[in-house]
Amino acid sequence: MDFLGSFSYAVPLAGAALAVFLAGFGSSIGVGLAGQAAGGVLSEDPDKFGALLILVALPGTQGIYGFLGGFLVINKLGLLGGHPAHLTMLQAWQVFFAALPVGFAGWISGIHQGKVCAAGVAMTAKRPETMMKGVIYGAMVETYAILGLLATILLLNGIKLS
């Protein structure tokens, strides 16, 4: 049976897709929330663009982590090198579940990081010298997206494929 037609590849590829889609979904909402807040501030004071750009961009990292998780799954399957691994259904499901931590962590933390960064934008609007405090608060939420990526990496490395 051709490896692309095999159901054993559909399962882990669905996990890779979920990692990318969920983390990207969280990032897009988070960047949107922070961007809306920044847009309001910039309408009053366009000179704050540089300071606010960091706060708006910060929730976008979860999408990058999800993309990396999806890439790691595809690489683990050997689909990039032209030598696909032979998977049992147990291995297929293991890879599927290994992809989920980065997807779900990115989804939830991206949204919440956007909220924290929007609050940082409001703080920067009133007191520009506090901008880095807002970035630090946003980076604290980032920790959980990084832990999700780390969990995906560790789980994928623990799966032995033939």
Image (cartoon, rainbow, N blue to C red):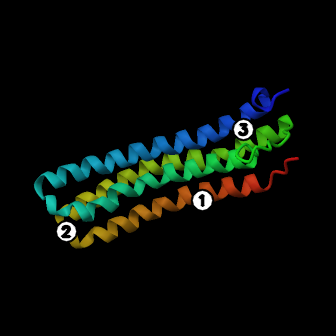
Q: CA distance from mark 3 to mark 2?
A: 48 Å
x and y, in percent, of residue 68 in the image: 59, 52
Which quadrant: the N terminus? top right
**Residue that protrudes farthest toward the front in the picture:** 82
Mark 3 surroundings within 10 Å by alpha-carbon count, few (fewer than 14), some (14 through 19), many (20 or more):
many
Q: Which of the two labelled residues, at mark 3 and mark 1, occupies the earlier sequence position?
A: 3
Residue 127 — which label?
Answer: 2
x and y, in percent, of residue 36 in the image: 26, 46
Q: CA distance from mark 3 to mark 1?
A: 21 Å
Give the number of the mark in front: 3 or 1.
3
Which residue position holds label 1?
Answer: 147
x and y, in percent, of residue 5 in the image: 77, 26
Cβ atoms at labels 2 and 1 below 8 Å apart: no
Q: CA distance from mark 2 to mark 1?
A: 32 Å
Q: Nearer the viewer, residue 85 or 21?
A: 85
State the SS at label 2.
Answer: loop
Which residue position holds label 3?
Answer: 12
Residue in view at x 80 percent, y 55 percent: 158
Residue in view at x 45 percent, y 50 percent: 110
**Residue that protrudes farthest toward the bottom in the picture:** 129
Residue in view at x 18 percent, y 54 percent: 41
Q: Which of the two labelled residues, at mark 3 and mark 2, occupies the earlier sequence position?
A: 3
Give the number of the mark in front: 3 or 2.
3
Residue flagged by tag 1: what amino acid is it? Leu
Mark 1 surroundings within 10 Å by alpha-carbon count, few (fewer than 14), some (14 through 19), many (20 or more):
some
Left or right, 156 with reference to 65: right
Residue flagged by tag 3: what amino acid is it? Pro
Q: Which of the two labelled residues, at mark 2 and mark 1, occupies the earlier sequence position?
A: 2
Residue flagged by tag 2: what amino acid is it? Arg
State the SS at label 1.
Answer: helix
Q: Nearer the viewer, residue 83 or 43?
A: 83
